[in-house]
Amino acid sequence: MPKKHFNQKQSSRNTKGLTPSIMKVFEKNIGLELTQKDLCSKIDANSPALRQQVFDTLIQLAKRQVIKQLSPHSYKLDEGLNTIEGRIELTQRGSGFVVQEGGSKDIFISPNNTNQAMHNDKVSVRLINIGKGRPEGVVIKVIDRNKTQFVGTLKIIGNKSILIPDNVRSGVEIEIVDNKLSTAVNGVKALVKITVWPQSSARPFGEIVEVLGFPGTNDVEMLSILYNQGIDPKFPNEVLEEAEYVSIDLDEAEIAKRRDFRAVLTFTIDPFDAKDFDDAISYRKLKNGNFELGVHIADVSHYVRPGSKMDTEALKRSNSVYLVDRVIPMLPEQLSNIACSLRPKEDKYSFSAVFEMEESGDVKGEWFGKTVIHSNRRYSYEEAQEIIEGKEGEFQDEIRAIDKVAKILREARLANGALNIESEEMRFKLDSKGSPIETIIKTSKDAHKLIEEFMLLANKRVSLFLSKPNQNKDLIPMIYRVHDKPDPDKIGFLKLFLDKFGHELTFESLDKIALNINVLLKSIREENEFPLVQSMVIRSMSKASYETQNIGHFGLAFTHYSHFTSPIRRYADLVVHRILETELVKRPHQYGKSLDDVCKLISRNERKAAEAERESGKYFQTLFVEDKIGEEFSGIISGIAEHGIYVKMTENNCEGMVSMQDIPGDRYYFDAEKFRVIGSKNKREYNFGDLVTVRIYEVNPRKRQIDLELVL
């Protein structure tokens, strides 16, 4: 590697600029004693000023315990000294933060210290600043690439071909080897795999894996979104072949081993366009006056065996991905839509949680086990809601009886401190060509809440059952869905945000914060700012994740919670099914420490899926308003940042941005302390929740961007 030359006029006291170069020398000579003279020679520091700067840098690094000083002029670096491992998250500006496990402070990495690490790579970092302030480090090794395939636009200039990544934060420009150019042409979108990245090269080299097509079509853009998140839209042939051997016919010998619920009233309630039916509800009255409520879940574990090709692929995917116009399933359709799916009028294997309950909602008994069911009826949420609201319909008495108990369970859960969040989901109505023609806000009604409460009940009771010691008095290896208490600093920011609307949030302790938030949300439910306030409440909470150590679920106010009810679309549920079956039949548990790695992987992939779904929505928003350039809309300020103001348009529910430099009438700036945008001279303010009028002046589907201007 060529020696690095430095500006001879650099200040002799500027130690920070030399640190990366000096550390690279130490990294190549771990354990060896190096003198100041050695270092000056290796980095070509020839002038007296630079030699003094090297000396000052060495003194500072020794004081910070980054290197060891052996004598007044000699130093060495121990292999294990001040190194940590974690995943690096890069910013738009090229700097990064390495997220440590166990809640320690994130390590700041400057742009010149990333050492070819890319977003979400697992890296080894040497700390170079361990003072009281923000810890800082340098990447010394990329342990595991988060991904090696990237989507972008091919740029061909002369005999050089470069892939320009769609996402500069999570991608890098890749030089295509000439003989690997395939049939791609200039301007086409392609999937490219990095093959080698020499230390001496600013760019990695790669080869084209797949040509996606020219930008602009829905198919190309959706494929780009998926590949950018490392999500493969296609199953490997060997996985599809394995799935084809799965029979949809039930075996009489297997049925005989199961509890038979086929004579018990059973139905599903799902979205009208659902194809995979994870769960069903059964109901029957008991002679003692109580009733039996069965939560029956598709028995995916019967078909997908540990170590099979389908299992390996399901773990790799971790979950299904729901884009606006398509679903990328975790399992091949032969299973997700046919064999496992609890379709109406068909006998199906299921794994069930069955409860004896009083009309008060109290659980008097429970049973878990393998079953066979027959769904009598498939309801859409809309059909079930009409029956709940009084419309005559099949099984109306049973649905209303179950709904009554669901409401009691929900009320008790909220009284116990669960957050009362009314879910809202923006959906698009598409025409025959897949273009958006209408936006719809889906809200959670009683039919949704009915299913939700009994799924929560099953998840909680399974988690409680598997949290006890097993027959050998050992803890059962388990995957929990955990949700930590919120960070007090985020709650403080939420209070500041609410002050702008004149709303007060009482914050005595984190134990009571959920109840206080519920009181606030109930009091403003009919106000215009309610959706925005609820969104900010959600943002102020911790992120839920999968863990092997149980800390409870803050948002649900449950001490124990796991995912059991959706194994068709979530790998965590499939693992819980296997653990539960193992415990029920008293076999030794096969899962051990490997569950920690499973939890990390599925939590990471869950975030990737959520990001892909969010970007898909952004893209279809741009398509929906593409023909509305120049039109004016009323809206509400939904976000404020250094670069501008985000506005959600009331009529179409789409969000765009007014650039800070385009706000008319003054030079505006972001006031971080009071979280507002304010004019330098006229002192006019723009705050969260302000009602404004905007005009759409530019739409860029490729960038998923709607540019707005304020109409004064």
Image (cartoon, rainbow, N blue to C red):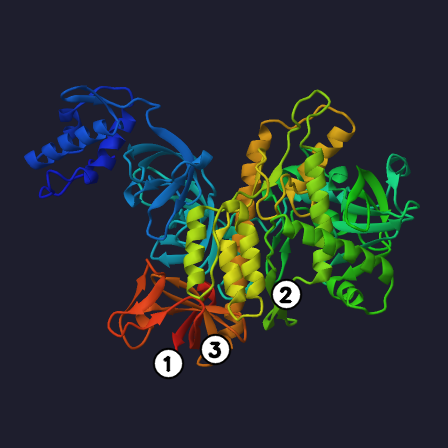
Q: CA distance from mark 1 to mark 2?
A: 32 Å
* Horizontal side, residue 110 vs residue 471: left or right: left
For the residue pair 357 and 264, the one nearer the viewer reads as 357
Instruction: Quickly name the residue at label 1.
Output: 712
Q: Which label was assigned to residue 211? A: none
Image location (x, y in percent) of residue 174? 39, 49
Q: Is residue 698 above or below residue 106?
A: below
The N terminus, quarter of image: top left
Image location (x, y in percent) of residue 170? 42, 49
Q: CA distance from mark 2 to mark 3?
A: 21 Å
> Which of disc 2 and disc 1 is earlier in sequence?
2
* Horizontal side, residue 197 vs residue 13: left or right: right
Dot 2: within a 10 Å radius of its alpha carbon, few (fewer than 14), some, or many (20 or more) residues?
few
Q: Is residue 472 above or below residue 670?
A: above
Q: Say which element carries label 3.
A: strand
The C terminus, quarter of image: bottom left
Q: Which label was assigned to residue 442? A: 2
Image location (x, y in percent) of residue 581? 75, 33
Give, as a three-letter code, the residue at label 2.
Answer: Lys
Instruction: Quickly name the residue at label 3.
Output: 634
Give, as a three-letter code, the residue at label 1.
Answer: Leu
